[in-house]
Image (cartoon, helix red, strand yellow):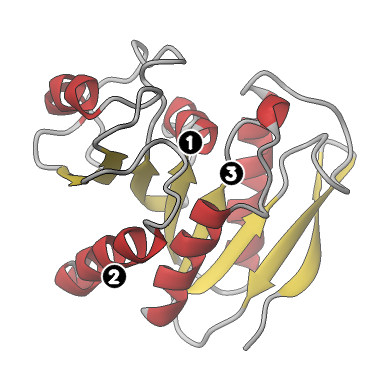
């Protein structure tokens, strides 16, 4: 099925999203890069993540954070955006999806990580290029939900060496996959992102 436009209500705001339904219990919310630098749900990496989950039979929901595109409100400095994520998770739960992954790219990964303790509906976190070279991740302690982290070997915003140093604190069991030659924007590397995520989902079906 094709994605359909949906509206999610949060804090009196209308948040625009794209929902692709699928049968079964499994679904994913995908969050986008930094709103102040042109980030939106219409992004190549977001679309690669959506594509991978769709191929694995998951329902998918991506949305524009407050103040982006047709979503109401203004930039919330990563705090208001956590409310947007909560509302997106609640939307999927209302669609009868009890098994929900939360996948974020760059700023989206940061927002997801900041709110992980309150995102009870999210069973797993997948992070693509968490921007550890640009935003503060010192708050993030052990979190068993963090299962997969993807980084580009040439990414100076989410440097893989720095992620590798931080990952044991986040979750020593989490998988780190580094895509050779990819920078933060993953031009021409979308198939690698999709392949890594599909491989992870296929290998961890028991968690879904």
User: Of discs 1 and 3, which sits in the foreground?
Assistant: 3
Q: Is residue 203 left or right of residue 72?
A: left
Identify the disc placed on residue 32: 3
Q: How many marks?
A: 3
Q: Which residue is mark 2?
A: 198
Whether tag 1 and tag 3 are in contact, CB under 8 A, the answer is no
Q: CA–CA distance between discs 3 and 2?
A: 19 Å
Question: Measured along the vertical axis of the image, is residue 114 above or below residue 4?
Answer: above
Identify the disc placed on residue 93: none
Q: Residue at x 21, y 69 (%)?
A: 199
Nearer the observer, 101 or 99 = 101
The percent coordinates of residue 123 (x first, y second) are 36, 53
Mark 3 vs 2, N-terminal side:
3
Q: Residue at x 23, y 29 (%)?
A: 160
The percent coordinates of residue 33 (x first, y second) are 57, 37
The percent coordinates of residue 151 (x first, y second) are 29, 39
Instruction: Indicate the quadrant where residue 150 lies.
Output: top left
Nearer the observer, 52 or 88 = 52
Instruction: Indicate the quadrant where residue 35 lies.
Output: top right
Question: Measured along the vertical axis of the image, is residue 108 above or below residue 124?
Answer: above
Q: Residue at x 23, y 26 (%)?
A: 163
Q: Which residue is mark 1?
A: 112
Residue 57 appears anywhere in the view: no
- Image quadrant where one finds the C terminus: bottom left
Q: Residues within 10 Å of mark 3 (few under 14, many from 20)?
A: many
- Image quadrant where one finds the N terminus: bottom right
Q: Is residue 155 left or right of residue 173?
A: right
Mark 1 vs 3, N-terminal side:
3
Nearer the observer, 17 or 83 = 17
User: Of discs 1 and 2, which sits in the foreground?
Assistant: 2
Q: Secondary structure at mark 2?
A: helix
Q: CA–CA distance between discs 1 and 3?
A: 10 Å
């Amino acid at each position: 099925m094709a994605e359909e436009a949906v509206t999610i209500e949060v804090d009196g705001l209308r948040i625009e999203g794209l929902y692709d339904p699928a049968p079964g219990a499994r679904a994913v919310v995908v969050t986008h890069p930094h709103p102040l630098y042109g980030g939106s749900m219409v992004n190549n990496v977001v679309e690669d993540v959506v594509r991978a989950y769709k191929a694995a039979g998951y329902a998918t929901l991506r949305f524009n954070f407050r103040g982006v595109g047709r979503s109401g409100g203004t930039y919330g400095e990563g705090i208001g955006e956590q409310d947007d994520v909560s509302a997106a998770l609640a939307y999927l739960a209302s669609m009868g999806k009890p098994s929900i992954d939360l996948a974020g790219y760059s700023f989206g990964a940061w927002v997801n990580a900041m709110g992980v303790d309150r995102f009870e509906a999210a069973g797993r976190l997948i992070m693509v290029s968490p921007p550890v070279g640009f935003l503060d991740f010192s708050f993030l302690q052990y979190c068993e939900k963090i299962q997969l982290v993807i980084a580009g070997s040439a990414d100076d915003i989410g440097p893989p060496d720095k992620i590798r140093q931080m990952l044991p604190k986040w979750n020593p069991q989490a998988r780190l996959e580094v895509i050779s030659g990819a920078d933060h924007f993953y031009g021409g590397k979308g198939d690698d992102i999709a392949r890594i995520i599909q491989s992870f989902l296929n290998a961890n079906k028991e968690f879904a």
